[in-house]
């Protein structure tokens, strides 16, 4: 995978999200924050995630959508159950994925992180294709951002977030990224 100077990965589907902004001056990318998401909750493959990240979620399409329709969130990447990789925000910009968060005493993790959403839930194992795509992406990003650390959303927002959840196999992932 190669990245252009604006931070878009070549050869994957780009769906620009308005839910991003410039990183603060001097903010080096140090973290990959791994999340999980499914919309509606527990359902996979539908348009809900893309609609949420592009502010087009129809609050009438599902009862849960009424609770989240006004949220302005995004991530840099989404990895679908079949391994399809989508990019919403160029790596040079700040995606709005981590919320209130702290890592090693530093707050505002969005300033210095890339967000990767895995289509899934805390209680369902992730697919082989997702681990393969995630590991490939992480290795590629490490080329552009040496020393980058992978963490779960739960690691930077403990007590508030649980993702990627107990079904995410950290040992498997770490063995795949080398």
Image (cartoon, grey):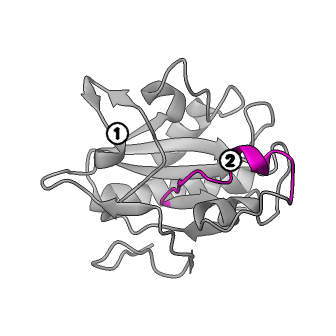
Furthest residue in direction left, as rendered: 26
In the rendered image, the vertical position of residue 132 relative to residue 106, given as above or below = below
* Residue beneath the point at 60% across and 59% down: 78
**Residue 106 falls left or right of residue 41:** left
Residue 100 location in percent, x, y?
A: 42, 33
Residue 131 in sight here: no
Residue 64 location in percent, x, y?
A: 81, 45
Sequence-first disc among 1 and 2: 2
The residue nearer to you, when weighing 119 against 64, is 64
Residue 171 location in percent, x, y?
A: 57, 31
Image quarter of residue 83: bottom right
10 Å neighbourhood of mark 2: few (<14), some, or many (≥20)? some
Which residue in the protein does label 2 denote?
68
| Residue 67 lies in the magenta stretch | yes
**Residue 130 falls left or right of residue 137:** right
Which residue in the protein does label 1 denote?
109
Circle 2 SS class: helix
Residue 58 location in percent, x, y?
A: 77, 63
- Tell me which segment is drawn in magenta: 61-76
The residue nearer to you, when weighing 107 against 143, is 107
10 Å neighbourhood of mark 1: few (<14), some, or many (≥20)? many
Q: What is the C-alpha distance between the residues marked 1 and 2? A: 22 Å
């Amino acid at each position: 995978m190669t990245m252009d100077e604006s931070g878009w990965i070549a050869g994957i589907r780009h769906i620009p999200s308005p839910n991003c902004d410039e990183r603060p001056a001097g903010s080096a990318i140090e973290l990959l924050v791994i999340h999980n998401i499914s919309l509606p909750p527990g359902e996979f493959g539908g348009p809900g995630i893309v609609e949420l990240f592009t502010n087009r979620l129809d609050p009438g399409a599902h009862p849960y959508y009424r609770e989240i329709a006004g949220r302005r969130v995004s991530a840099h990447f989404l990895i679908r159950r079949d391994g399809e990789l989508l990019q919403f925000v160029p790596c040079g910009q700040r995606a709005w994925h981590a919320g209130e968060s702290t890592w090693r005493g530093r707050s505002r993790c969005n300033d210095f992180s890339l967000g990767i959403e895995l289509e899934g839930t805390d209680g369902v194992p992730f697919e082989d294709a997702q681990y393969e795509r995630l590991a490939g992406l992480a290795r590629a990003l490490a080329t552009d951002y040496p020393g980058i650390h992978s963490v779960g959303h739960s690691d930077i927002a403990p007590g508030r977030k649980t993702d990627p959840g107990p079904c995410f196999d950290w040992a498997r992932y770490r063995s795949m990224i080398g």
